[in-house]
Image (spheres, grey):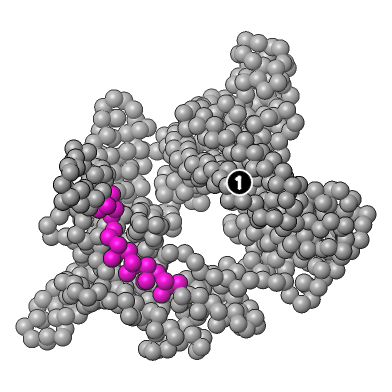
Amino acid sequence: MDDNYHYPSSTFLVQKFSLNSFDRVVARKGLGRRPDSTFTAKNEESDIDILQDVLKNTGRKCSDTDLSTLNLHFDRFTQAVNTVLTDIYSHPIRAQKIGEKLSASRMHGYTTLREETFLDWKQGNKFGQLVYERMYRNVLETAARIIHSDYTRRKLVNATLDILKGDEKELTRLLSNKRIPSDLIRNVRDAGGQKNSSGYHYALSACRQVRRKLDDFLLSMNSIEKQPIERAGKRGRRRQKVRLYLKDIDFQDTQTTDIILKQISEWNTRGFPFNTPQFRKKTTEFTASTENSTGQGYWFIQDPVRQDEIILFIKTPPGVTQKERVPDSPYRNQTLRFRFLNWLPRKAKRARKKAEEALKQGDMERGRKLAFRASQFEEMSNQLLNTIKLHNLSRELALLRVRKEGTKERIQQIKKEISLLKDSRRSAPPTLRASGNRVTLLIPFLPPDEKLLKESLSHIERKHRAGVDRGLRYPVVVSIQHKEDAYVERKIGLDELYKKRERLRQQARVLLSQIARKRNNWEKKHPGLQIPSQSLKKEREMESVWQKVRRLDKEISHQVASETTWFCEHYGVKTIYFEDLRTFQGKGGMRTHSWNLSTNLWGLMIDGVTYRRMILGHKRGGVWTVNPAWTSQKCHKCGEVGVRVEKTDSTEETKGGEYFYCESCGLSIHADVNAARNILEVQQSKPSAVSGRTS
């Protein structure tokens, strides 16, 4: 990509829309989300009933009737997918052949499974009783994704068994180490032929699957140990028991190794005990419904009265019907009606106003960011409106063709409009998802095209490089080489969110210690008995704490990735280099720093930056990861090893100091800034041809 060229991304931008029951008033700016605080109940029974209705209905978006009908729809879809999976996996050779076909066809799932005669949909057969014909396309598409994923994982599991069968050292590392070695994961990935971007994660999943089965095998071996290991309920607890057991018996000098290798050879010969995959999500995808006809199962119309509100019609499966006749529905009585707010125009207007204010105040970076966001939301809204127009015109054309009299001029006019709309940018088929009492519609939009990117980002000349360090004092430190010896840095730190996250993580550590102590005491006093529910309160509390941490991780990663992306875009950065912390092992004395650096938060930040830069027109995001070895110890100016100091004017070494001092050249600089500048130099010495990784 040259300095001014913008590469259109193939990544869909998925936006969420909360569905409401048809008769409910959609909340705007928070109105209607809570009961009226001014309402007070009196002693009269009627007033109490009114209050109960207010409390029951105002906080919920979907009524019980709509939710129950929609859950039946989800159950039928899930049952149909699992029926397809059961039929395929009932014959292992058949499942293997279909997996090979899907892999060779580059995941054209529906067209591949449609060729199998035993999967034909017929009215009245086991598939026809669950879903209608067009929805069966989506069933086959969903099943094909599961089969392809399972086929890839099975290949990698077999590759893992081949590697472990002849190498006792690798077997010892897999079972004894707390984490699966990264070089073993890469060997499995290469042996399984999965050298794409997701191959590493597939290989990691395969190694975990094999290790889990080996753990179960070890835990069930009563003849090797005098006191058999009890099965623990949690996976991590079982893993800990296996590691302690292997440590106590000196794994390599006992017959345990021979027995495990014999079991691996048996799996190689007779086959690994795989489970038949199952579909369990409360999700319905319309991805195989690419035509603009009523048969695809969903239908949009704009509400003629309420501004920016869209009515969604959902066709329900056979046997799931509504009693009343729904007007304006193409599905007669097999219809569910919802409505949702098209918030895109309102967000675009608000972002445009904020962009003008930021430009007046001289904040060019924020102004460009908000202006681009406004253009992006406006373009998404146009895509949705184009889709709705095409839906309705296609239906009107079908109805006019039936009449055949006095409609020729209107038919020709509609055909012209349809041809223009088909060439325009439109949203992709949505996904329907349920979680508790909430139903969400996920609509994929096309990313900004080359025209929009050039209009919004034409002033940016991309020719600089940036290094990003995962700091100890700041979550992210970005250093941009603006000129040959000139750098621009930004320390991105969300202090309040980050401190709250660390407090929650510390709370989780304390709870984990308390839970382990309670479990050990119970097992000593009552061996073999189930832990009482009263003692499991701490575990539920710890799970709720981790849910809060995960939500904070998402929020922090979103904010950091956004600020990093637009800071680099403001200075015309073409390539960003991150340090690769996948194999990071904390040294002694680092205390909580090693725990902070080894979390998955860093991976979320990198993924967020890559996603946003792809939207801005960078091919594959322009993101690379480099080996972080010595980037914190060496001076970026002279290359000599320096020391950590407490203050900028100090020369006395302090472990974990915030600043870096080089005794050779006298440089004194913030340690994280020095590391970010060093990350820039790693790529210069040893480049890699593989995107996303530098040796």
Q: Quadrant of residue 646 in the image?
A: top right
Q: Is residue 297 left or right of residue 478?
A: left
Res. 58 in view:
no
Res. 621 in view:
yes
Q: Residue 674 at x, y = what percent? A: 62, 26
Instruction: Say few, some or many: other residues with alpha carbon within 10 Å of mark 1 (under 14 / 14 to 19 / 20 or more).
Output: few
- Span of residues in magenta: 56-78
Give the residue drawn at x 57%, y 71%: 277
Give the residue drawn at x 62%, y 56%: 201
Q: Nearer the viewer, residue 488 or 91?
A: 91
Furthest-right residue in view?
253
Is 357 covered by the magenta stretch? no
Q: Quadrant of residue 220 in the image?
A: bottom right
Q: Nearer the viewer, residue 453 or 376?
A: 376
- Circle 1: element type: helix
Q: Is residue 315 left or right of residue 8?
A: left
Is residue 288 placed above or below 506 in the rendered structure?
below
Q: Residue 27 at x, y = what percent? A: 23, 48
What amino acid does circle 1 point to? Ser
Q: Is residue 50 left or right of residue 213?
A: left
Can you say which quadrant of the picture contains the C terminus?
top right
Is residue 628 placed above or below 70 in the rendered structure?
above
Is 65 covered by the magenta stretch? yes
Q: Residue 303 at x, y = what percent? A: 16, 60
Give the residue drawn at x 49%, y 85%: 119
Q: Residue 50 at x, y = what percent? A: 18, 50
- Write down the residue under mark 1: 535
